[in-house]
Image (tube, rainbow, N blue to C red):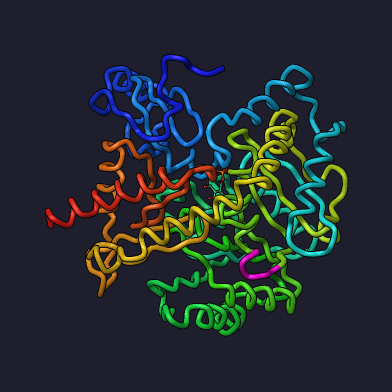
């Protein structure tokens, strides 16, 4: 079902109107009257067709997509194998509800996810529709399993916006403002930020300092570890600025969790499903979380999430938790097709292209005075924008300008955290596309620096 008069199959951007074009402008105006004003659109992209790593807007402009629907379309837009699986399933069975009935594809996907989750112990899988739902399920499971009710999460964390997940989220005050009291018994602690430190954590000792904070401050003064049900961590903070937790920190955290019978929950909603060049970001540290939550890249854009738990941990009883739509058959076949493609090519490609981009940007901190750091794993790459490399002063205005400038050059990127640019393209990009993205951002940075 290719659009014959479209250039969407070209690999690089092609702009034919001013941005936004006339049709996009009209659509944005209509949107502003009827769609929730809580959405945060950075620029007026009005998408019509997506193919691979490119997107065509309603005016016929072609963009290179390094945002991938917020790190979702892992296999690119409308991969033919994913589309074929969806079309076939839609003709056979669209919905049945795995809560009340059985269907083969749900078992198949659960078996597959259980086999790729880290650790030898057998796993069981709960299906939801969104990242937040996977987190909600994990909040409930850790409480049910441990019979404890306190939770720990991290400064800068983003776990979703439903009331439970929001209680763990500590990313931006605006996300919590106006919503009253959230879940009680949630404690936040500093994330091991090896670039900037913060909250008295020394960047060069981030892992040791944060572990010491947990044991010597939090456990001694605020919450007894015997009351803690779970610690939730993004192995690489997504909305918090594409910040990786060091391997030794994750290993230390696991050690502390095991010692106190606390469930370790890895939120791999953004970092999972091959984005980092391994199935899971936590594979880089060798930890075996009790629970992994995943969503975004799991089904190439179809709404699906999974909470994968050690079988002995998932001891809740029938009726304890469920969802009418969770694990919808059409989403599940999209996920099975996605996983096949990830295994065949795209995880390896994510690792390779990530290395390639890191190579191309290796001299950015010396060539550019507003680049503080380029970091990340695979195709989860963060570029820290600062006003001053020495003071590391955040420069959200410059970061935001870069996002806008890139859009006007045909490159779709998003910010993350206060002052980070993120690259989270589909995992199928090639060197030409990676080079284009890097060259474009490089040129935008140079332009900003000349104007400073
Ligand atoms: C790490 C992480 N957890 C949870 C969520 C929430 O996912 P959703 O928006 O699908 O509810 C997100 C979304 O950005 C995320 O990045």
Q: Is residue 107 above or below residue 211?
A: above
Residue occupying the point 58% across, 39% down:
75
- Magenta region, residue range: 283-287
Residue 374 found in image quarter: bottom left
Residue occupying the point 74% across, 75% down:
258
Q: Nearer the viewer, residue 55 or 351?
A: 351
Q: Position of residue 197 (x, y in %)?
A: 41, 75
Q: Position of residue 11 (x, y in %)?
A: 42, 34
Is residue 285 visible in this depiction of the protein?
A: yes
Q: Is residue 12 above or below residue 134?
A: above
Q: Is 77 displayed left or right of 384 in the figure?
A: right
Residue 230 found in image quarter: bottom right
Q: Nearer the viewer, residue 395 or 372?
A: 372
Q: Is 369 displayed left or right of 341 in the figure?
A: left
Q: Which secondary structure is most common in the magenta stretch?
A: loop
Q: Nearer the viewer, residue 333 or 8?
A: 8
Looking at the image, the residue that sits furthest to the front is 432
**Which part of the image, by quadrant, shows the C terminus?**
bottom left
Residue 389 found in image quarter: bottom left
Q: Is residue 149 above or below residue 205?
A: above
Q: Nearer the viewer, residue 205 or 371?
A: 371
Is residue 164 visible in this depiction of the protein?
A: no
Residue occupying the point 84% across, 63% down:
121
């Amino acid at each position: 079902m290719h659009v014959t008069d479209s250039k969407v199959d070209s690999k690089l951007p092609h702009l034919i109107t001013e941005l936004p074009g006339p049709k996009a402008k009209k659509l944005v105006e209509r949107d502003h009257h009827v769609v929730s004003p809580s959405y945060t659109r950075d620029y007026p992209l009005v998408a019509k067709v997506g193919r691979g790593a490119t997107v065509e807007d309603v005016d016929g402009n072609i963009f290179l997509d390094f945002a991938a629907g917020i790190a979702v379309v892992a296999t690119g837009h409308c991969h033919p194998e994913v589309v074929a699986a969806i079309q076939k399933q839609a003709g056979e069975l669209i919905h049945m509800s795995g809560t009340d009935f059985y269907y083969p594809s749900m078992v198949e996907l659960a078996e597959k996810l259980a086999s790729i989750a880290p650790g030898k112990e057998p796993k069981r899988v709960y299906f939801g529709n969104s990242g937040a739902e996977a987190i909600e399920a994990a909040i409930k499971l850790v409480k049910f399993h441990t019979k404890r009710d306190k939770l720990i999460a991290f400064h800068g964390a983003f776990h979703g916006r439903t009331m439970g997940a929001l209680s763990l989220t500590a990313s931006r005050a605006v996300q919590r403002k106006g919503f009253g009291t959230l879940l009680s018994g949630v404690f936040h602690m500093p994330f091991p930020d090896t670039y900037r430190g913060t909250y008295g954590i020394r960047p060069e000792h981030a892992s040791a300092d944060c572990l010491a904070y947990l044991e010597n401050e939090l456990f001694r003064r605020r919450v007894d570890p015997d009351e803690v049900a779970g610690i939730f961590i993004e192995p690489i903070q997504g909305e918090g600025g594409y910040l990786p937790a060091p391997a030794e920190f994750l290993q230390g955290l696991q050690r502390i969790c095991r010692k106190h019978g606390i469930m370790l929950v890895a939120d791999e909603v953004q970092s999972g499903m091959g984005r980092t060049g391994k199935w899971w970001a936590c594979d880089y540290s060798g930890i075996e979380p009790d629970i992994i939550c995943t969503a975004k890249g799991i089904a190439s854009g179809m709404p699906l999430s999974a909470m994968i738990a050690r079988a002995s941990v998932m001891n809740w009883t029938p009726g304890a938790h469920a969802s009418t739509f969770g694990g919808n058959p059409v989403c599940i076949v999209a996920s099975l097709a996605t996983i096949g493609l990830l295994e065949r090519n795209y995880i390896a490609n994510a690792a390779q292209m990530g290395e390639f981009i890191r190579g191309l940007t290796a001299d950015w901190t010396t060539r550019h005075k507003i680049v503080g750091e380029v970091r990340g794993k695979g195709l989860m790459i963060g570029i820290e924008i600062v006003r001053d490399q020495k003071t590391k002063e955040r420069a959200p205005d410059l970061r935001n300008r870069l996002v806008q400038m890139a859009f006007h050059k045909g490159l779709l990127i998003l910010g993350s955290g206060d002052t980070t640019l993120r690259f989270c393209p589909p995992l199928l990009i090639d060197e030409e596309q990676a080079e284009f993205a890097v060259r474009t951002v490089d040129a935008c940075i140079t332009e900003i620096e000349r104007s400073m």
